Amino acid sequence: MKVPAKDKAEALVALHEILKPGDTVYSVVRTVAKSGMSRTIDFYVFRDNRPVYLTGYMSTALGIPRATGAHWALKIQGCGMDMCFATVYDLSMALFCPGKYDHDAAYSLKSEVL
């Protein structure tokens, strides 16, 4: 999905305000394709015991399309690994490692499936 640079930058700024290193990003797998090759996943972080919906910002920041229909979760392609973790890892890279790989920063966010 092609995202304008301005929109991507705005989404990353919003995510920087919400997420800090060490935070846990929670995933909810909504659907899995019959082939197992894709799934739709929503992402949240908890603040003051209330969920904060991250999926919209993540879609824009990472360039991942959202599913249509009953829900607007991210449509993640791939199989053979934990796609929830992989997406949170990609988010961590985008937020805390722009332009250069840093092992510690790449694992700044924790992932947990609900």
Image (cartoon, helix red, strand yellow):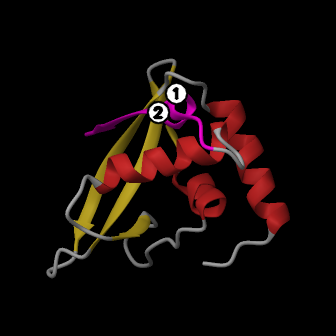
Where's residue 48, x and y in %?
Answer: 51, 18
Where's residue 21, x and y in %?
Answer: 57, 24
Who's the residue at 64% across and 36% down the image? 96
Q: Are marks 1 and 2 in contact (CB under 8 Å)?
A: yes
In the depicted structure, whether residue 59 falls above or below residue 112: below
Residue placed most toward the observer, 11 or 90: 90
- Report helix, strand or loop for mark 2: loop
Give the residue type that dot 1 points to: Asp
In the depicted structure, whether residue 29 falls above or below residue 25: below
Q: Which residue is mark 2?
A: 107
Judged from this view, the residue extending furthest toward the left is 34
| Rendering quarter of residue 20 | top right
Residue 104, disc = 1
Q: Is residue 71 visible?
A: no
Give the residue type that dot 2 points to: Tyr
Residue 57, disc = none
Who's the residue at 52% across and 27% down the image? 104
Q: Is residue 89 visible?
A: yes
Verify whether residue 102 appears in magenta. yes
Q: Nearer the viewer, mark 1 or mark 2?
A: 1
Gap between marks 1 and 2 measured at Cα:
6 Å
Location of the C terminus (image quadrant):
top left
Where's residue 3, x and y in %?
Answer: 71, 72
Where's residue 2, x and y in %?
Answer: 67, 78
In the depicted structure, whether residue 108 falls above or below residue 83: above
Q: What is the span of residues highlighted in magenta in the rendered image?
A: 101-114
Report the number of discs. Answer: 2
Verify whether residue 109 appears in magenta. yes
Disc 1 residue crowd, few under 14, some 14–19, many 20+, Cα 10 Å? few
In this rendering, would 96 be left or right of 32? right
- Report helix, strand or loop for mark 1: helix
